[in-house]
Image: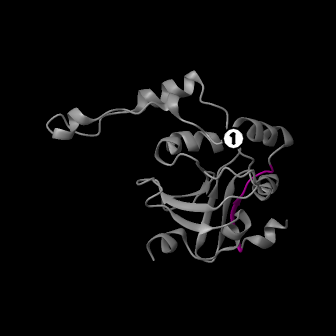
Amino acid sequence: MNWKAVFEVCYEKCPEATEQELDMLINDWHRPLSEHEIKEIVERQRNPFPVSDPLHKQYQPFDPAKWIIPNKRLPATYVELLRYSNGGEFGNGERYFQFFSTAEFRAMMLAYEFPEYMPGAVPFAMDGCGHHYAWDMRSNKDQDEYPILVSHSGNLGYEDAVHIAETFIELCQGTISAEDIRYG
């Protein structure tokens, strides 16, 4: 794939991912949460309601130990992109991409608590306006491409997510912004 020809604009090209970085990503992104990761997630949970709010007493923190991360292959075209640029920022028309690097991939999924709010969705980039691009890996099929959803980080959930592309390359070649797809 000629990634230079796929994107109209290259805002920031990063160095290529090494084979070691790719192997770590491919073999590690879907592993169950470690005790350390569970502890970090539990410790950052806070009751969002003030004590005076009736909802304060109803708040229940979630248990990340119950999270299931899909054990699926990443699309080959995405791995090819990482061989070209390990992360980076690119654009086509009004569509903007901030791709996660191999080191950020799992961390972003856990930081935004995707397994809690959108189980089976796996984010791989953002659009610069708070929207995530995420593969919908809920299908039981053994496949290499997944439908792609766009969802806002402040309101993650399938009910508010919008389908934006069937494949990774279709997403990358699109020119309409994620915001226009979601709200337009």
**Which quarter of the figure is the N terminus placed in?**
bottom right
Disc 1 target residue: 71
- Relative to 86, is 179 above or below? below
- Relative to 27, is 97 above or below? below
Q: Nearer the viewer, residue 139 or 15?
A: 139
Q: Find the residue positioned furthest to the front.
A: 140
Secondary structure of residue under mark 1:
loop
| Residue 166 in view in this figure | yes
Q: Find the residue positioned furthest to the top.
A: 35
Range covered by the magenta-colored residues = 8-16
Q: Amino acid at mark 1?
A: Asn
Q: Is residue 150 left or right of residue 97?
A: left
Q: Position of residue 77 (x, y in %)?
A: 78, 59
- Residue at (58% x, 47% y) in the render: 120
Q: Is residue 132 left or right of residue 146?
A: left
Looking at the rendered structure, the number of numbered marks drawn on it comes to: 1
- Relative to 164, is 53 above or below? above
- Residue at (62% x, 58% y) in the render: 98
**15 in the magenta segment:** yes
**Which quarter of the figure is the C terminus placed in?**
bottom left
| Residue 104 in view in this figure | no
